[in-house]
């Protein structure tokens, strides 16, 4: 996971904002219990979303209580207690982070040295849940093979990431896994891969690294790629959104699912349009009340 999955905050209920933060803290605690302290530094809000999603589908309520933590030592914050699911998700996060850093090593990224700090946590994670390593290792190898071959077919290049998320969802959900939960996670995995390719377009071109959108379109900059292939890109993403909506409508939830609905139905499309049309770049926030309005105007233009 890369940190792209986020809610549309102007449309997020206060109760769900609190739940979102509490689930984040819960996964952080799960990482500590399953993989150790150092591995906690790799956590993103993507996994908080996954925690909220799988707990609801599995019908396992979370216990939220106010506690202190290392990051917030003076004021107690609502935190979800670490349970079996959050520990498992913490292990998923750690194994993904470790393999992502191995991939960075192949790309000669300076940050790849950080993998040595996650190796111990990675070993603990795969000792607890061996299937995680098999799935992630196999699909990352398939992804690497396609990239080395210079694959220019967008659907083909996305397949390993999408398949990895689908298979991981089966492990996490167990007997609560259905064709629709697998379809949803498959679409989310595909979206994350494309979002990363879109966001890193200019950097990848500059450094001569593989990027499926560059290989498919050949434009020198992200702006040119979007301008020259606008209709096709919108079609690709809108089809993914349609798949997510259909899957979501057929999944049985045990509790209120306003939070995950907001993220899937509003947050993911909003993030996509921000990256496509430059509403606000990574790390450049606009005021929430103007952000959605700006995006809608750009989409309609």
Image (cartoon, helix red, strand yellow):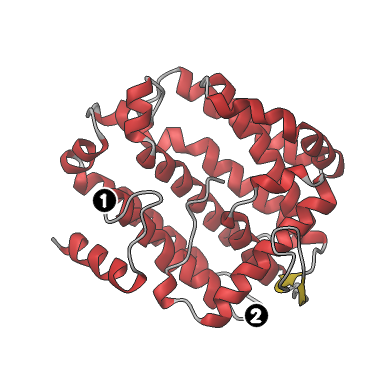
Q: Is residue 135 above or below residue 265?
A: above
Q: Which residue occupies the foreground of this view, 254 or 27?
A: 27
Picture quarter containing residue 124?
Answer: top right
How crowded pointer 1 is (Cα within 10 Å; few <14, some 14-19, many 20+) is rated as some
Q: Which residue is mark 2?
A: 255
Q: Secondary structure at mark 1?
A: loop
Picture quarter containing residue 213?
Answer: top left
Toward the left, the furthest residue is 301
Q: Position of residue 55 (x, y in %)?
A: 70, 68
Q: Position of residue 248 (x, y in %)?
A: 51, 67
How crowded pointer 2 is (Cα within 10 Å; few <14, some 14-19, many 20+) is rated as few
Q: Is residue 252 visible?
A: no
Q: Which residue occupies the foreground of this view, 196 or 64?
A: 64
Q: Is residue 241 left or right of residue 220?
A: right
Q: Which residue is mark 1?
A: 278
Q: Is residue 95 left or right of residue 206?
A: right
Q: Secondary structure at mark 2?
A: loop
Toward the front, the furthest residue is 74
């Amino acid at each position: 996971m890369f940190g792209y999955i986020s809610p549309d905050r102007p449309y997020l209920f206060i109760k769900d904002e609190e739940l979102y933060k509490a689930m984040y803290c819960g996964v952080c605690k799960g990482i500590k219990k399953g993989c150790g302290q150092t591995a906690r530094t790799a956590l993103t809000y993507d996994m908080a979303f996954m925690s909220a999603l799988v707990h609801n589908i599995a019908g396992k309520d979370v216990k939220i209580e106010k506690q202190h933590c290392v990051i917030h030592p003076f004021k107690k914050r609502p935190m979800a207690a670490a349970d079996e699911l959050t520990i498992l998700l913490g292990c998923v996060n750690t194994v993904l982070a470790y393999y992502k850093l191995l991939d960075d090593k192949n790309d000669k990224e300076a940050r790849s040295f950080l993998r040595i700090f996650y190796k111990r946590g990675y070993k603990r994670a795969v000792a607890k849940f061996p299937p995680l390593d098999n799935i992630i290792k196999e699909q990352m190898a398939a992804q690497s093979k396609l990239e080395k071959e210079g694959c220019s077919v967008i659907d083909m290049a996305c397949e390993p990431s999408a398949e990895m998320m689908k298979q991981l969802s089966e492990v996490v959900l167990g007997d609560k896994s259905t064709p629709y939960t697998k379809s949803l996670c498959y679409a989310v995995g595909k979206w994350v891969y494309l979002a990363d390719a879109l966001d890193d377009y200019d950097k990848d071109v500059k450094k001569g690294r593989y990027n499926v959108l560059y290989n498919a379109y050949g434009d020198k900059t992200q702006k040119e790629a979007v301008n020259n292939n606008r209709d096709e890109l919108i079609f690709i993403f809108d089809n993914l959104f349609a798949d997510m909506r259909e899957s979501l409508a057929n999944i049985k939830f045990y509790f209120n699912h306003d939070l995950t609905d907001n993220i899937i139905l509003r947050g993911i499309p909003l993030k996509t349009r921000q990256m496509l049309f430059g509403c606000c770049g990574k790390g450049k926030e606009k005021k929430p009340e103007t952000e959605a309005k700006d995006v809608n105007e750009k989409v309609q233009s």
